[in-house]
Structures are given as C-alpha cells and as structure tokens.
Amino acid sequence: MSTLQGQPAEIATKTTASTVTTDVIRAEELRRHYRMGETVIRAVDGVSLSVRTGDFVALLGSSGSGKSSVLNLLAGLDRPTSGSVKVQGRDLAKLSREELSRYRLHTVGMVFQSFNLIASMTVAENVELPMRFAEVDRGRRDALAREALARVGLQARMNHRPSELSGGEQQRAALARALINLPQLLLADEPTGNLDSHTGIEIMNLVREFNQQLGMTVVMVTHERALAERYAQRFIFLADGKLVGDEMNSSSALRLGEHRPGVEGER
C-alpha cells in the first residue's frame, strides 16, 4: 500500500494506535429539540447508533432530515436536549465548555461545505491556526503546516490567501487544517457541495486515503447516494430527525479492494 505524501512519524504512531476495533462513537436515544415560536422542532429525535474505529460512514437524508444536526452533536458544537453521545467513552453532554474546546482541538477534525477559511490569513496561517490554540511551538507549527499542505498537494500555494485559490484548493486547505492536530475522527458536512464533480472526486479520494491508510474514522454528511456508494463502507439514513435505515456497502468494499488497517477479513 502506498503512503501519503509527506507523512510524518507522528501520523505513523497514530495509525498503529488506531488499529483496535472499538466503538469510537456511541449515541443512545439522542435528541435535539428547539422552539421556533410556538412550534417545537425535533431536529434529532431519538437516534441511537454506534461507529467503530476506522469506519467510513455516510449520513444520508434529504434537507431537514437531521443529518447535520447529528454531526454538530458529534462535534460538540451543540448539546443534546436528552440522551447521550459518547466519543471514545466520553459523554459530550457532560463536558464543560473548556473540555469541549479541547475535544474539538485534539480529537475531532471538521470539514464544511463552505470551507470556513479566514480571508485575511495565508493558507499556511489558516492551517496553523489549530496549533496556535494548542500552544504548539512556532517553529514546529511551521514544519507541521508544510507537511500537512504537502499531503494535500498545496505546498506551492501556502503563502497565498483563500481568495487566490480555486474552490478545490480552498477545500484542500480546509482538509489540511482539519488534519493538522492528527484527529482520530474526521467529520465532514457536505464536503463536495461547493465543488464541481471532478474536484469533488479529488477531495473525496484524499479523505478515503486518510481513512484507509491512517485508520482515521470518517463520518460524512451527504444527500448524494452516488457519492456515499463510491466512498463509504456504511450508510445511515435519517428522516425527520429519526434513524430510518442502517446498511453496509459491500459493493464499495469489493470494488475498492478495501481493507481497514489491522481488521482484514472482519466483515
């Protein structure tokens, strides 16, 4: 198996640690309700699910089905109304604001449809930003940012600003930023939504490399069944805030010759 370009020793260490097949995510009767005037919006309404370490899972559903709300709960960006969501055994609902910030900094990487790059910063500065919050030494930040940008093919654009990049390049920069602190869980919310089909495939091929070669768990929100079938091992279907289906994508595994690190033949 080929290795990712510029892969540092720290990633290799993390890959070894991620080969144990355990549930990285476990949600039980998860609910997120909120009021809009006199109406109660049941964005997430009793969802129970688990995701194993190293899986690539697609959350599928139409607009308003609750898939992005579930992702926000997994990211610790929102708190459940009731129920629990545990990541690596920690109940996110019981964490303080500071603990949730550290969780997002060290455990989770997030990629959004809108890129969310800071326009006034260079690409390298955007990628370094999580390390600044983690108080990583400045010299080490620079080296790690270069490595992260090399992994996504942007080393020649590191001193450009987001407005000088194409949409695909901006999403590559966002992906490098999401991965800079070597998260064990990558959460992607419609990561190809603002990209043409060719560029979207390039981005998704990168995400698949991180999943297959590094054992990184990926949970991706999408409304595109074809995209999910091409990349995800498992589909979770949502409608009206409820889980309405959960199935494996055996055809994808056969087509891609997929083998998760350390768990061959487990399916």
Image (tube, rainbow, N blue to C red):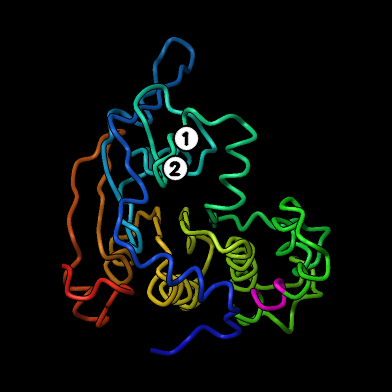
Residue type indicated by callout 1: Leu
Residue type indicated by callout 2: Leu
Q: Which residue is located at x 83 percent, y 58 percent?
A: 120
Q: Main secondary structure of the magenta part?
A: helix
In which quadrant of the rendered image does the N terminus lie? bottom left
Residue 146 lies in the magenta-colored region: yes
Where residue 143 sits, quadrant-wise, is bottom right
- The answer to whether marks 2 and 1 mark residues whose Cβ atoms lie closer than 8 Å is yes
Where residue 149 sits, quadrant-wise, is bottom right
Pointer 2 residue: 74
- Residue 101 in picture, x, y percent from top left: 62, 41
- Residue 217 in picture, x, y percent from top left: 40, 60
- Residue 51 in picture, x, y percent from top left: 30, 52
Q: In this picture, which residue range is highlighted in magenta?
A: 144-148
Pointer 1 residue: 92
In which quadrant of the rendered image does the C terminus lie? bottom left
Element class at badge 1: helix
> Is tag 2's residue or tag 1's residue first in the polypeptide sequence?
2
Where residue 180 sits, quadrant-wise, is bottom right
Q: Which residue is located at x 65 percent, y 35 percent?
A: 98
Closer to us: mark 2 or mark 1? 1
Q: In the rendered image of this protein, does residue 201 appear above or below residue 226?
A: below
